[in-house]
């Protein structure tokens, strides 16, 4: 399946991060390494979530290109990413596009899910979901959309409770924060 097919693919590719993700996806398909690259990107995403130093590296515009390339390649080696992802991270650093990494990871996951015939749902919860909760959520979403659903989980304590689910352009917001805001608006009249 081509990465540029479908309306969602076109809108993803319109962004800078989407174009980089599309290029990486095409390389991964060519190398028959889509799953391997997706696992490596998940490891990079986890490292970003856990390491303030890594987040600072990708966000800093003042780190010299050569230093950024060396640092990101060293981080990739420490994380244990595959060779395609390692090279790609080096290219991002060389092109001063490391700040696009979170968007690239999300877009790549969307391309990979579509490649497998799945739909991707971005799910935000106030607290980490258990594996059982994730499985139940996937089953509910599969019944709703009529196909397999992979979930991209994010934790945001600011939503207080409940979930915010985005599938393509559709959003299901059952967060307590949204309910409280709606109640406050209704009370204002």
Image (cartoon, rainbow, N blue to C red):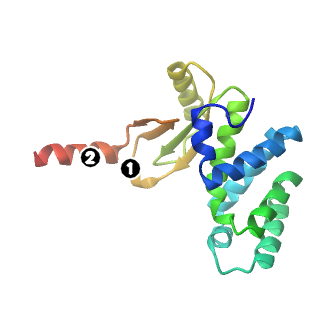
- Secondary structure under tag 1 reads loop
Crowdedness near tag 1: few (<14), some (14–19) or many (≥20) residues, C-alpha within 10 Å: some
Q: Residue 9's image quarter?
A: top right
Q: Quadrant of the C terminus?
A: top left
Crowdedness near tag 2: few (<14), some (14–19) or many (≥20) residues, C-alpha within 10 Å: few
Tell me if residue 36 can be seen: no
Instruction: Give the CA separation, mark 1 to mark 2.
Output: 10 Å
Foreground: 134 or 182? Answer: 182
Report whether 132 appears left or right of 159: right
Sequence order check, earlier mark of 1 and 2: 1
Residue at the disc numbered 2: 180
- Where is 72 relative to 117, above or below? below
What residue lies at 76% left-to-right and 48% top-to-bottom?
Answer: 23
Residue at the disc numbered 1: 160
Q: Which mark is residue 12?
A: none
Instruction: State yes or no: discs 1 and 2 in contact (Cβ < 8 Å).
Output: yes
Q: Residue 4's image quarter?
A: top right
- Where is 13 relative to 171, above or below? below
Report whether 91 appears left or right of 172: right
Q: How many marks?
A: 2
Rendered location of residue 137, percent (x, y):
53, 30
What residue lies at 16% left-to-right and 43% top-to-bottom?
Answer: 186
Rendered location of residue 107, percent (x, y):
64, 45
Q: Residue 131's image quarter?
A: top right
Q: Quadrant of the N terminus?
A: top right
What residue lies at 59% left-to-right and 51% top-to-bottom?
Answer: 15
- Secondary structure under tag 2 reads helix
Rendered location of residue 134, percent (x, y):
58, 34
């Amino acid at each position: 399946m081509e990465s540029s097919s479908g309306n969602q693919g076109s809108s993803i590719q319109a962004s800078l991060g989407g174009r980089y993700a599309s290029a990486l996806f095409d390389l991964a398909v060519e190398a028959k390494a889509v799953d391997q690259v997706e696992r490596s990107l998940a490891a990079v995403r986890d490292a970003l979530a856990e390491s303030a130093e890594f987040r600072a590296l990708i966000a800093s515009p003042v780190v010299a290109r050569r230093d950024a390339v060396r640092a990101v390649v060293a981080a990739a080696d420490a994380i244990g990413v595959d060779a395609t992802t390692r090279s790609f991270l080096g290219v991002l650093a060389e092109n001063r596009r490391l700040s696009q990494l979170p968007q690239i990871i999300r877009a790549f996951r969307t391309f990979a899910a579509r490649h497998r015939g799945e739909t991707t749902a971005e799910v935000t919860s106030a607290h980490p979901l258990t594996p059982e909760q994730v499985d139940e959520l996937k089953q509910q979403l599969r019944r709703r959309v009529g196909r397999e659903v992979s979930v991209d989980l994010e934790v945001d304590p600011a939503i207080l409770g409940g979930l915010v689910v985005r599938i393509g352009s559709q959003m299901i917001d059952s967060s307590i924060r949204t309910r409280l805001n709606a109640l406050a608006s209704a009370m204002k009249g």
